[in-house]
Image: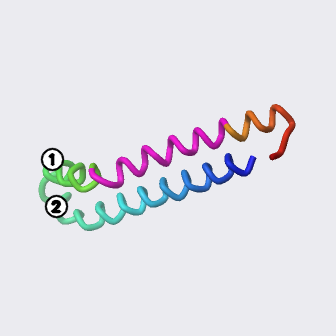
Amino acid sequence: MNTGLWLLLIGVLLVGLAYFSYKRAESSLLTLKKEDLVSYYLELALRLLPFPFWTLLLGILLILAGLVVLLVNLSRGFFY
């Protein structure tokens, strides 16, 4: 059960980190968004692809794995 909770916690932290990276990149590109929308989305994709995208993906996978571990432990009735 502790393993599932830890996986959930780490997953939520990684998703939060990816979200804050997205908001930081979005706020730094506000002037570009007003000028040219296509360039804005291209630049946003280039800024988010290396780190925040993979962080978000790993966070979602860890959340799903944590939920599976928790549900399996709860269905057995064991809390170890």
| Residue 62 within the segment the image draws in magenta | yes
Q: Residues within 10 Å of mark 2 (few under 14, many from 20)?
A: some
The amino acid on which the numbered mark 1 sits, given as a three-letter code, is Val
Q: Is residue 4 left or right of residue 75?
A: left
Q: Is residue 9 left or right of residue 73?
A: left
**Residue name at image x 41 percent, y 63 percent:** 20
Q: Is residue 50 left or right of residue 57?
A: left
The picture quadrant where one finds residue 26 is bottom left
Q: Main secondary structure of the magenta part?
A: helix
| Residue 69 within the segment the image draws in magenta | no
Looking at this view, is 37 or 8 the one in front? 8
**Residue name at image x 50 percent, y 43 percent:** 60
**Residue name at image x 48 percent, y 53 percent:** 15
> In the drawing, what numbered circle is on residue 65?
none
Look at mark 1 in the image and give the residue it sits on: 38
> In the drawing, what numbered circle is on residue 32?
2
Q: Position of residue 38 (x, y in %)?
A: 15, 47
The amino acid on which the numbered mark 2 sits, given as a three-letter code, is Leu
Magenta residues (range): 50-68
